[in-house]
Amino acid sequence: VKVMNMNQLADAVRPPVVPGQDISVRVRDVGREREQGISFLDDGTMIVIEDARHLIGQQVHATVTRVFQTQTGRIVFAQLRTSST
């Protein structure tokens, strides 16, 4: 009987997110650090957006700066996009 690891399966079907990628998300909560806002991708991946605390409840455009893999999943870090980009 072949057994599948559910974490590996979940990782395999997650959409890729890479540094430099532009994303549009709704800021849902405050982050741990000063001025961070928190959002989530459809698959549950947490996104930490710098300088977005004052934008809770709003849709924002951000650029992925780093993707951090943990034992329980991944955390995406992003920076708000300026209107000139």
Image (spheres, grey):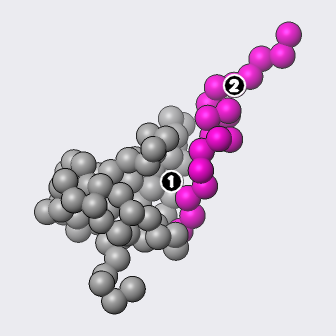
* Screen quadrant of the C terminus: bottom left
71 is higher (above) or lower (below) than 33? above
* Magenta range: 1-19
Q: Residues within 10 Å of mark 2 (few under 14, many from 20)?
A: few
9 is higher (above) or lower (below) than 84? above
The count of marks equals 2
Q: Position of residue 41 (x, y in %)?
A: 43, 48
Q: Residues within 10 Å of mark 1 (few under 14, many from 20)?
A: few
Outermost residue toward the top in this view: 1
**Among the 4 quarters of the image, the one containing residue 83:** bottom left
* Residue corresponding to mark 1: 68
Q: Secondary structure at mark 2?
A: loop
Task: Report the side of 82 relative to 42 (left or right).
Answer: left
Task: Report the side of 13 relative to 33 (left or right).
Answer: right
Give amino acid for label 1: Phe
Q: Is-magenta flag for residue 17?
A: yes
* Residue corresponding to mark 2: 5
- Residue 6 is labelled as none
* Screen quadrant of the N terminus: top right
Residue 61 or 35: which is nearer the viewer?
61
Q: Residue at x 45, y 44 (%)?
A: 42
Q: Residue at x 30, y 65 (%)?
A: 60
Q: Secondary structure at mark 1?
A: strand
Outermost residue toward the left in this view: 54
Q: Position of residue 34 (x, y in %)?
A: 18, 60
Which of pointers 1 and 2 lies earlier in the amino acid sequence? 2
Q: Nearer the viewer, mark 1 or mark 2?
A: 2
Residue 4 or 60: which is nearer the viewer?
60
Q: Position of residue 38 (x, y in %)?
A: 29, 52
Give amino acid for label 2: Asn
